Amino acid sequence: VSSPVSLKVALLGCGTVGGGVARLVSQNAEQLAARIGAPVEIRRVLVRDLARPRPLECPKEWLTTDPEVVLGDESIDIVVEVMGGEEPARSYLDRALSSGKAVVSANKLLLAKHGPALLRTAARRSVDLAFEAAVGGGIPVIRTLREALTGDRVLSVHGILNGTCNYILTRMRNEGASFESILKDAQKLGYAEVDPAMDVDGHDAAQKLAVLSMLAFGAAVDIDQLSVEGIRDVDDVDFRLAERFDFNIKHLAIGIARGQKLELRVHPAMVPTSSVLANINDVLNGVYIQGRALGPCLLVGRGAGELPTAVSVVSDLVDVARARLANASGLATRQIQPINRSLLSLDDLETRYYLRFDVGDDPGVLGKIASALGEQGVSVEQMVQEGRAENTGNPVPILIISHRCREGAVKAAIRSVRDAAFMKRPPRFMRIEDI
Amino acid sequence: VSSPVSLKVALLGCGTVGGGVARLVSQNAEQLAARIGAPVEIRRVLVRDLARPRPLECPKEWLTTDPEVVLGDESIDIVVEVMGGEEPARSYLDRALSSGKAVVSANKLLLAKHGPALLRTAARRSVDLAFEAAVGGGIPVIRTLREALTGDRVLSVHGILNGTCNYILTRMRNEGASFESILKDAQKLGYAEVDPAMDVDGHDAAQKLAVLSMLAFGAAVDIDQLSVEGIRDVDDVDFRLAERFDFNIKHLAIGIARGQKLELRVHPAMVPTSSVLANINDVLNGVYIQGRALGPCLLVGRGAGELPTAVSVVSDLVDVARARLANASGLATRQIQPINRSLLSLDDLETRYYLRFDVGDDPGVLGKIASALGEQGVSVEQMVQEGRAENTGNPVPILIISHRCREGAVKAAIRSVRDAAFMKRPPRFMRIEDI
């Protein structure tokens, strides 16, 4: 027999995160009830396979494979979506919100693609849609952007948002090894998926950046419009050469307010080793936020994992449950109604650049490259020619650190020398982030 | 004419933080109203001096020097205390809470000393007492402990909580300079007070640790019982020697759950340079939290300053205003009711230690010190004798890094050699924090 004032919760999905949520809710029942003001009761759990073993805290009688049983149940107050994927999650949540249920979701893909639409539905029905767990696992980045920054303007967000990329780059640096060899080992150890594309090609980080941008900049972002580069092309040579200039290489997701426009990009970048982001290593995630009033704020923690993510889901559950109990549903959601913002073209980006030209060992080449850069107005801060190849025929790398300049100019300069006979490999460039 | 549903706010104090709050509330009025669900209106501002200039956003007609006018005003919903100090702030807030007003306070001294009593009063009257701004300025550490960790257990908190100490230690390290010389310069530059005792003797950090402990461990702490050491005794020699072992020296406030007991201490410590806390420099604050479920979480930002602190006050204001509007006041407060926890004695502390003995240049001394340590069961991990003094008569430092051992044993070993003829200066020891 359930208490008449208890809050009824349904889980969509009961994998590792869902199991963690069930466990936390059961183990901390008393604490949660005190915090919320009423007990929380999981009533339904939608799964695909009734036969699969579930945690003790998720008894058989809660399970169903029929979405109708869950979504059509009018007694359910809050739907917790931990199933992942775009469909059917989107339709389920749309229906849940439309019928006045609050929703907690840990689904970054869904929020990146359909967050603005779901938030509109939620606002229309005055219900809450919370998603702390969608970005940064146990790091309270959503909460910080959403609540602590009330009364502030976010100027920029720089994030190490993908644990797999950070793990691989950390090991490449420490071991002087190639991307391919570390990826293979990471797959063996379970730090990278069998199909690693989502992670190492930057799509996961791009989705998270889109979710952060909704809160940081009130922006509805089309993730297909984002500039996204992964880490497959990061070369162990670049790590070695980066050290010469006191840089480390990190895979960053960056959002910066530029007047009415927004600069959003995901790519590997050179960061000074003294930078706060340079020393966030292994699978850790980190987000560096600059607020106009708040100043700089860095949040670091485990970006993924059953328990950190489940803790974030439960903290959202507490928030929406309290609001519901207090008849204050939807206030938080109404505040976040992202609108379209136009994106700054990468050609208009201005930063410093690291450039690498692998050239034939010919004394005239340096001058030709310097001239090509000069013609485009790219001013050189440092130029280093690595130890000569002594007639081995091996290419010699020329490294250049530019002053701040337009990316369009850098690319034009690269294009103008790319096909020259002395160019032994395609030129490489990487943005330098001075944070 | 004020809207009947607006929330009426009184400020106690209108110095830099109070002025910042008035400015943020005025400049973000629309945004705040949307977030809360009703407009917020500052009605009264208690000041000591009516003649002092105030920000534009704080018009003369709000000001009063009479506490009765503010505290006796039944229309006031929320009292924001930014006056600081123990009395009369304590009596004002006790009265405000007792008469059913919600309170937002940025006063760490008050909360460290009277937090548990004020929280009891708040719970009895079902009103909220929020204090995000009391610790860590703009860093959302209170919020993180209070909300995001619902459903978790905090295992430990390691904080760099005093910006002045961190600034001085950072410069001592970078410049190889003495404490006294950097302190003087910091006072000139406004980074240290004319009377620096609160900061450099560790009391400010101790108060913040007491406040964090209420939330992290549910502990009511008597700050006079805390073990507190400042940074006056940190020697530029220790910095030089620390580098040899890849350590940096940071002033830390540490709280660790040890079964039923609590380990709470504030002191300078050696931290490995690869540690997340080792690279938080200058006036920045940082808090490293380990949660059972959450794992590690690091929060870094400006620990003080008008605007970061004001942003935290306003974010609290939003929270308590929303709860009040929703008739959900006091739920958050009722959850935090700290109780007395007994503290672990420092003698029972187990960690690694850095020891420095400045001795006469005599080949037998090393053996005597090693024996003294051995007799107390202190096992040596590394022992280094600095370059011999070549009969200059100057003392020669012997450095020792111990394995993990009881602090009582280390102190006993030090006592047993302290008065020996070969000991040219009092022995020094520092705890090593391997985080």
Image (cartoon, coloured by chain):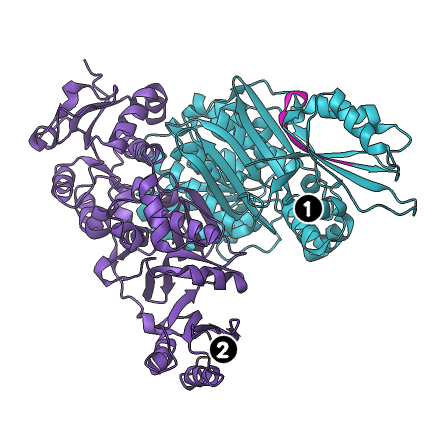
Chain colours: A cyan, B purple
| Residue beneath disc 2 | B380
> Marks 2 and 1: same chain?
no
Chain bearing mark 1: A
**Residue A370 vs residue A28: left or right?**
right
The residues tagged by marks 2 and 1 sit, at their Cα atoms, a distance apart of 37 Å
For the point 80% across and 41% down, which residue is it?
Answer: A397
Reply yes or no: does residue A88 show up in magenta.
no
**Residue A102 position by quadrant:** top left
- Asked if residue B294 can be seen in this view, the reply is no
| Disc 2 residue crowd, few under 14, some 14–19, many 20+, Cα 10 Å | some
A420 horizontally vs B376: left or right: right
Q: In the image, what residue occupies the spot 54% across and 64% down?
A: B244
- The residue under the point 62% across, 24% down is A222
Measuring from the top left, give residue A229's x and y in whole percent: 70, 34
Chain for disc number 2 = B
Q: Which type of secondary structure does the marked residue at label 2 adopt?
A: strand
Which quadrant does the C terminus of chain A fall into?
Answer: top right
Picture quadrant of residue A195: top right
Q: A168 and A355: which one is in front?
A: A355
Of badges 2 and 1, the one in the foreground is: 1
Q: Position of residue A430 (x, y in %)?
A: 70, 35
Name the residue that disc number 1 marks: A244
What's the magenta region?
A347-356
